[in-house]
Amino acid sequence: MSATFPLPLGLPPLPAELAALAAPPSTAEENPNEIVRQAFRIGHMRLLAPFAIASELTEMPNVYPLPRAPANLLGLVNLHGRIVPLFDLAALFETEHSLREKRMVLVIGHGNESAGIVIDGLPRRLAFMPESQIIPPALPDLAAPAVIASYSLGADAWFEFDYAQLLELLVS
């Protein structure tokens, strides 16, 4: 005779970022005019990417450096048997990674057309109204041409880049 008894796991509550991801989808209708993006940080830079472009988020894997590679190219990483270049954009944006946040790898692109970038902490979902689009504030010379759009949220500016163009600039 076997019986099953529910046992309390005693796990601590999820952090707010993870709880939001685990929550069931909102039943409230979304505004069709909203611009919804995946938001993440690299140091003090606030970046955005369409959800269709960012294909994976993972903890920092082993990085295999390449000799004579540009400083922004940390090396190659193995993600599920696929070799992906890993870039650190902190120097490009003239910032340093946050010491308080865990470094993660956000994979931009899909399949053989993908690259990883080092980000600080977990990404989150942000929605902007079209009227929150602003003229981008001054950015480093190399990064400025790759800006697609910038948005204001409170006192913060968030930047969406053409990541393919940005990463191509780094390796050329």
Image: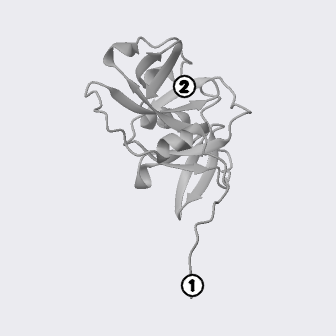
Query: How many labels, in total?
Result: 2
Residue corresponding to mark 1 = 2
Tag 2, which secondary structure?
A: strand
Where residue 152 appears, as percent x and y from the top left, is 45, 15
Does residue 31 appear left or right of residue 54 in this picture?
left
Q: Earlier in the sequence, mark 2 or mark 1?
A: 1
Amino acid type assigned to the residue bearing label 1 in the image: Ser
Graded by Cα atoms within 10 Å as few (under 14), some (14 to 19) or many (20 or more), the crowding at tag 2 reads some
Is residue 90 among the parts visible in the rendering? yes
Where residue 70 appears, as percent x and y from the top left, is 63, 39
Where 32 sits versus 58, above or below? above
Is residue 172 among the parts visible in the rendering? no
Q: Residue at x 66, y 24 (%)?
A: 95
> Nearest the camera: 91 or 47?
47
Q: Residue at x 55, y 38 (%)?
A: 17
Where residue 65 appears, as percent x and y from the top left, is 68, 51
> Nearest the camera: 4 or 162?
4
Q: Where is residue 74, by image quadrant?
A: top right
Give the residue furthest to the left. 32
> Nearest the camera: 86 or 65?
86
* Residue 134 disc label: none
Residue corresponding to mark 2 = 46
Graded by Cα atoms within 10 Å as few (under 14), some (14 to 19) or many (20 or more), the crowding at tag 1 reads few
Where residue 129 appears, as percent x and y from the top left, is 34, 19
Amino acid type assigned to the residue bearing label 2 in the image: Arg
Picture colour scheme: one colour
Q: Residue at x 28, y 27 (%)?
A: 31
